[in-house]
Image (tube, grey):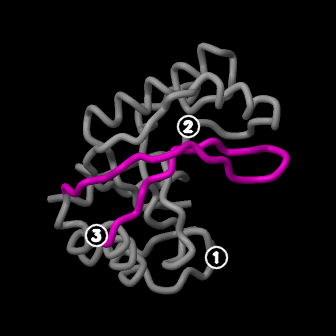
Amino acid sequence: MQSVELLLDRASDAAVRAQWDRLCGAGLPSQARHTGASNAPHVTLAAREAIDPGAEPGLRAAVAGLPMPLRLGALACFGRGRFVLVRLVVPDARLLALHAAVAHVLGPDPDGLRNLAPGEWTPHVTLARRLTGEQVARALGELDGAGEQTGVAVGCRRWDAATRTEWSLLT
């Protein structure tokens, strides 16, 4: 799997990592448990089984307007049975336009990841994966008071999960 991801400013990154650490400290699943150098809070704009390297110039042009304001909003859960705990990103016209531009460069998704398609996308930053219902309740208690936070998307990277490599799309 390969993806295009927005990266957060230092303060927003640190705030999300602090939430990861609170979950981890409470013995709950957390992104903090992934200790790889590339593990960073991010907002996924697109994901494909493979992204054609020929798309790079178009992707670079699409994200050339960064940095841009970004608002982290409420906590939410995705899934059934095993849940993903996230911080929603409050979409504005500029973020939606960026998402649409990246989708246009990449073209239709042959893998059918509808949750990343324009009009279907729910921008978010993942806090924890594979939580049970009971763990979700505990996690929400641990993160009580996690209010809205204004930040900035300062970077955009490509991530290749197969090779575990990342590179910036900003020049």
What residue would you read off at disc 2? 127
What residue would you read off at disc 3? 94
Percent x, y for residue 78?
Answer: 69, 52
Which residue is nearer to you in this view: 140 or 56?
140
Q: Amino acid at mark 2?
A: Leu
How dense is the environment of label 3, judged by Cα within 10 Å: few (below 14), some, or many (20 and up)? Answer: few
Q: Amino acid at mark 3?
A: Arg
Q: Magenta residues?
A: 67-94
The residue located at (30%, 56%) in the rendering is 156
> In this rendering, is residue 75 above or below 36?
below
- Residue farthest to the left, as pictured: 171
The residue located at (25%, 54%) in the rendering is 69
Name the side, left or right, on which 84 lies relative to 169: right
Percent x, y for residue 167?
Answer: 31, 52
- Sooner in the amino-acid sequence: mark 3 or mark 1: 3
The residue located at (28%, 69%) in the rendering is 94
Residue 111, labelled with which disc? 1
The quarter of the picture where residue 9 lies is: top left
